Every structure is written in C-alpha cells, then in structure tokens.
Image (tube, rainbow, N blue to C red):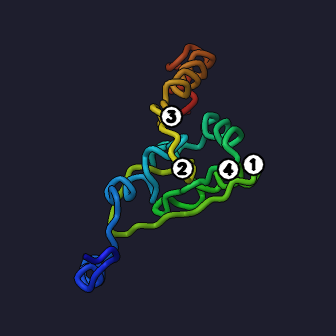
Amino acid sequence: MQNGPNLEDYLNQGIYGKKEINPEEKKKFLGTFRERIVVALTVSQVYKSTIYKEVEQEMKKNAKAKLLLNGSVDYEYLSKYVKIANKYNIPFTIVENKEHDTDIGLVLAHDYAVDKENIFVSDESESVTIKDNLDTTENGVKGFLKKLFS
C-alpha cells in the first residue's frame, strides 16, 4: 500500500488543477475563507464616498490581519482604505479574478479562523446620518431639492 500521491494523482492534478477546499467560497471572499474574516464590505459600499468607521476600528484592533481588495473596483475608491491600512501597518492585496465575479469589495481577514458571526457592515448608521442631514436643511427634503435644482 502506498502512502503518498501516485501517478494517477499527479495526472489528475495536471489535468484538473490542484484540489482546493471550498473553491467557491474562496472566490467569493477574495481568496480567503469566510471563517477567517473580521469585517467585509460589498462593492457598492466601497463605492460610497464615506469611509466605514467599523472597518477602521477593526483595522486598529486586528493589527495582524490583512486587507484584501476587489481588483474590479476602481483604485480611486479603494485608495481611502489603502491609506487606513498603511496608517495601521496592515498589508493589503488587490485581488483580481477575471473568471469569477463577486459582490464583495473589501475583506479584512486573518490567516486563521476567527469565526465571527456577523462580518458585514450594515448601512443603517449611514442612513441615519443622511436623514439627519436632510432634516437640517431648510424645510427638510423640500429644501434639499430646492438647493439641488436651483
């Protein structure tokens, strides 16, 4: 009985590629496993002009983590998170996968499992800020639209 890989294993690896655990999960989460992620943003969240304070807080708390950024997002939008990563000496990688499309824009992850239940940042806190800003304009939404179209 043979303990190591045999000729058939080498041929299969050459034909089909190296065996991977959960390849779809790794493609979705920019090359890492879900269980290793501390915080994640969707592509649409990365495109927003504001920086999510939760991401910066997690970078501050998890200095040994690495930042993975979706390469299909323009660098103009990724750069604000790159600056924060540099501020906290967190290494970052821009991940491009032309064969697989993902809605994940940013991932802060470790090389080991952290099994955090909720990794996604909600937009609820931001929507409160926008609502507060609308109420402070003259006559709320009417004032906002008046300023927008005048």
Q: Secondary structure at mark 4?
A: loop
What residue is pinned by disc 4? 64
| Mark closer to the chain start, 3 or 4 | 4
| Mark closer to the chain start, 4 or 1 | 4
Q: Secondary structure at mark 2?
A: loop
Mark 1–mark 3 distance (CA, rounded to whole Å): 20 Å
Q: Which of the numbered marks, if any, corresponds to residue 112?
A: 2
Observer-side mark, 3 or 2, equals 2
What residue is pinned by disc 3? 121
Mark 3–mark 4 distance (CA, rounded to whole Å): 20 Å
Observer-side mark, 4 or 1, equals 4
Residue occupying the point 61% across, 40% down: 55
Residue 134 percent location from the top left of the image: 56, 21
Residue 27 percent location from the top left of the image: 37, 59
Query: For this rendering, which residue is in front, 84 or 12?
Result: 12
Residue 30 percent location from the top left of the image: 45, 57
| Mark closer to the chain start, 1 or 3 | 1
Q: How many marks?
A: 4
Q: Callout 4: 10 Å neighbours few (<14), some, many (20+)?
A: some
What residue is pinned by disc 1? 88
Residue type of the residue flagged with mark 1: Tyr
Residue 96 percent location from the top left of the image: 46, 67
